[in-house]
Amino acid sequence: MTKRGGLALFGALFGALAMLSLHAEARGFEILRVRSAAGIEAWLVEDHRLPILSLAAAWEGGAGLDPKGMEGIALLTAGLLDEGAGRLGADRFRAALEKHSVRLSFQADHDALYLSMRSLSEKKEEAFRLLRLAVREPRFDSEAVERIRRQILLNLARKTQYAEWEARRAFRRALFGDRPYGRIKEGGEDSLKRITPRALRSHGRALLVSDRLTIAVVGAITPEALAKALDEIFPPPRQDAPPEKTTAPPLPSPKPPSAKGERILVARDEPQNVIIVGGAGLVRRDPDFIAAALMSRILGGGLSSRLMRRIRVQGGLVYDIHTELIPHKRAGLFLAQTQTRQGQGAETLALIREEMRAMRMDGPTAPELADAKAYLIGAYDLRLDSSLRLAENLLYLRREGLGMDYRTRRRRLIDSVRREDVLRAARRLLNPDKMIAVITGAGEKGEKEEKGEDKK
């Protein structure tokens, strides 16, 4: 949740590393599989060109494992892991991070609890020591718990002021119901207030287990040194203990989301309508995912997309409109989102559905598909502009089972997508009559307008 230490030094070094990383991407890099004596595995890109070490890790589960009545505990846990550990209270722990120029942060979403760490290679021993304390001996002091709890509630209160956030919350709730992806990771005031330091310690022990841990490392460290560090930092799987003592609780059974063509009004007295139209998407390992990503790019990705040309350029109804293909670990979602002036919501919604039907019926043109392929191929390496972002990308590839050679295979996979593949993906994802439509509006008048009841 927070970033610590060495900001001025890291600013200069990371800027240089970003430039070097672009050259590294052009010539490729080798990914090594490192396995510790205790059986903890990591992917490593060993790179000594700059004295920097980046580590990304994830414990599967995240807010998806929040117990009923304590929703928000994963996010609260993540916010507290760098707020004191071992004998170091929050202030002393932050001071130690700053002293040794270590950046350490934890985050949580519905799928996992994430760790990212950056350090100078000459400071890696201290960085590893502090990281070990954070994941093995978090304190969850009462003062820190109350402070981070207030921070989460304040951030949640701020979010509720935005129509877009409320619309997306309503969309997820309609799509996934009361299952984890339908709930917000913050929980709520009532559930957060039930979470005690004792509950956090118990939940942390259940969540931060090596059985659910995935790790990727990039930077100036040898495989031998990393293998040793893995056993020093992370608690190894205990073979002599019952499984329920060493693994987190089972994740909820994946169920397909339901989309019934609902129309949902989120009443807000504002001059703009936020509009979301969507339904179930695809998980990343689905064979049609790349074809669906190309379809999404053609339909609503960028200034030349169909929705942008039809609704902004020709219709003058919106400033921005885009589509999103969101692959969670156990289910996906697809949506189109925009906003327009009150009084134009019904017309905008009708045009979105019209373009979705056209894509579902006819698929892309050959030039559209070629442009979308060029974009997807070119955009990938631009995202890997630092050692930490590369580590996070490797972590994603591991978690999704895409393989070490995915970067070399990716272009071939995209190039091999045919028009009929995109059409098949469109017919799986785009059925406007059965998709959920959420619109923010001004009470009864906005609801009538969205349903078209005030049209003559």
Image: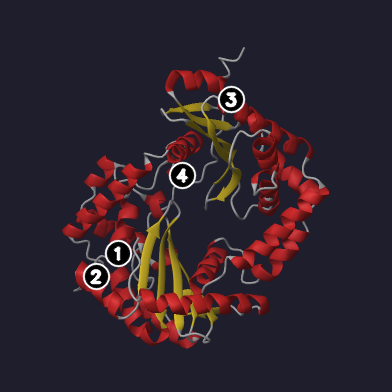
Mark 3 or mark 2, which is nearer to you?
3
At a point 56% along the width and 33% down the height, the residue shown is: 259
Element carrying mark 3? helix
- On screen, residue 399 versus residue 166, left or right, reads right
Mark 4 or mark 3, which is nearer to you?
3
- On screen, residue 301 versus residue 60, left or right, reads right
Decide: is 445 above or below 178: above
Going from the N terminus, do you reach mark 2 or mark 4 first? 2
Q: CA distance from mark 1 to mark 4?
A: 24 Å
The circle drawn on residue 192 is none
Name which residue type carries label 1. Leu
Q: CA distance from mark 1 to mark 2?
A: 7 Å
The quadrant the C terminus occupies is top right
Name which residue type carries label 2. Ala
Decide: is 167 above or below 26: above
Circle 3 crowding by C-alpha within 10 Å: few under 14, some 14–19, many from 20? many
- On screen, residue 80 versus residue 292, left or right, reads left
Q: Which residue is labeled 2 in the image?
A: 85
Circle 1 crowding by C-alpha within 10 Å: few under 14, some 14–19, many from 20? many
At a point 67% along the width and 33% down the height, the residue shown is: 315
Q: CA distance from mark 4 to mark 3?
A: 28 Å
Name which residue type carries label 4. Tyr
Element carrying mark 2? loop
Circle 4 crowding by C-alpha within 10 Å: few under 14, some 14–19, many from 20? many
- Pinpoint residue 130: horizontal percent, then vertical percent: 30, 76
The circle drawn on residue 81 is 1
The circle drawn on residue 346 is 3
Q: Which residue is labeled 4 in the image?
A: 181
